[in-house]
Amino acid sequence: MKTNDLHIALPSSKSISNRWLVLNYLMGNAYVLRNLSPSDDTALLQTLLGQLKRGTTTSFMCGNAGAVARFMMAVLALTPGEWTLDGDERLRQRPMAPLIEALRSMGCPIQCLGNEGYLPVHLTGYMPKYKMTELDPSESSQYVSAMLLAGPLLPQGLTLTLTDRAASRPYIDMTLKVLSSAGIRTSVSANQRVYRVWPLDNALRRKQAVDMERDWTSASYIYAAAALLPGFRMRMQGLSLSTSCQGDRVTAEIFQHLGVVTREVRSPYRKEVRSITVEGTSEYLSSLEYNFIDCPDLMPTVLVTCAALGVKARLKGVKNLRVKESDRIHALSEELGKMGCHITQTDTEVRLSKANLTPKEPVNVHGDHRIAMAFGVLTLRYPDLIIENPECVSKSFPNFWEQINLIKQSVQLAAEKA
């Protein structure tokens, strides 16, 4: 269907891709995985699982990929052998204790080689006698997903009790969806504290293809672009609000408050949603309040967009952003501060006062792909703005700059025709 919309090419979801990679490995590659994420994290996980399968190494390096490290820790803990798991300096600062303690309580020997509760660790692969354990998920839902993905390996399956409210809970729902799609039986209690996974014996081991969804988190940067370019409409294939298992589809809800209209586009033949369009309207709230406890990756994009639009913001549920690829609260405060914004912060929220954004200095992205992309969108409005270490976006959205340049060219072309 031909339209005048600018078509944006999004990567597939790395969160979905990584879950399917782990599960498919455990199931003996029972599925054909199509359209895997092109991200560095997914490529790294593929490499590590391949090395484990071939037995070419006993030492696994995870860079600064937190989810990869946590997923690999659970897999290695249940795989016979002696293993070492490590990462770069930043990953060594990111917490692992809840996952380590959960595995230890099941009888898995894990020794921290540096600081207790952090990488590097030495694991003695062991099939535990106990099928029940508990875990504190308040720092990261990745601990829970790691355990749930490894649970089908256990002869009796796994019963996992959460001792607190989980951060980023939609990612746990995503994990359950992937397990269910592979025919593995799961259940969750009404209060979402007790999870049960049945063993692989009950799985449907069919050689069939699985297509990965496009990534809603990556779409958030295109929403930010739409907010900064009112009247300019863009289309993203492979996204759906109604059928996606990704929690970050709340991007559409959040950016509606910032003047962006979302429309689902249905196939004229199959009547199913095939894409969405986004368009800014210049009609947005003067202040925004939102809790990001379930969608923390969206917070940097929303905060920078608010700053660019002159919108006051009170953003809650941000505590865990301090233990991501960077301390994102510090990074945002420092870089927006250079642009004339006044930000106050507590352990649980960030407040942005209304200000006129005046970018003058290069943006230090603090080695963080999401900081780079959140500020990268600003180059649509401030073309002379320099983003340092721009290549770090390959961690999740390798063609990000290509899409930003495509938007710039299309806007310029439209201006010349006007």
Image: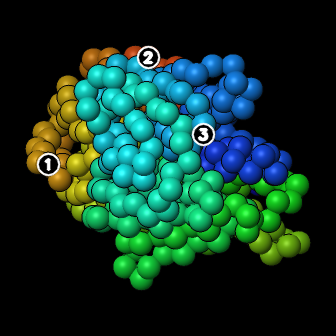
Find residue 322 and report its horizontal and vertical position in percent.
25, 39
Q: Residue at x 71, y 44 (%)?
A: 25
C-alpha distance separating marks 1 and 3: 38 Å
- What kind of colouring is applied to the model shown? rainbow
Q: Amino acid at mark 3?
A: Thr
Q: Residue at x 59, y 65 (%)?
A: 156
Q: Earlier in the sequence, mark 1 or mark 3?
A: 3
- Local SS, label 1: loop
Residue sitting at the far bottom: 190
Q: Earlier in the sequence, mark 2 or mark 1?
A: 1
Q: Which residue is mark 1?
A: 347
For the N terminus, the quadrant is bottom right
Q: Amino acid at mark 1?
A: Asp
Residue 79: mark: 3
Q: Are marks 1 and 3 in contact (CB under 8 Å)?
A: no
Please give the count of numbered marks on the rendered protein.
Answer: 3
Q: Report the mark closest to the observer, 2 or 3.
A: 3
Q: Is residue 15 above or below residue 58?
A: below
Find residue 12 and report its horizontal and vertical position in percent.
66, 45
Find residue 173 and report its horizontal and vertical position in percent.
52, 65
Q: Which residue is mark 2?
A: 389
Q: Earlier in the sequence, mark 2 or mark 3?
A: 3
C-alpha distance separating marks 2 and 1: 28 Å
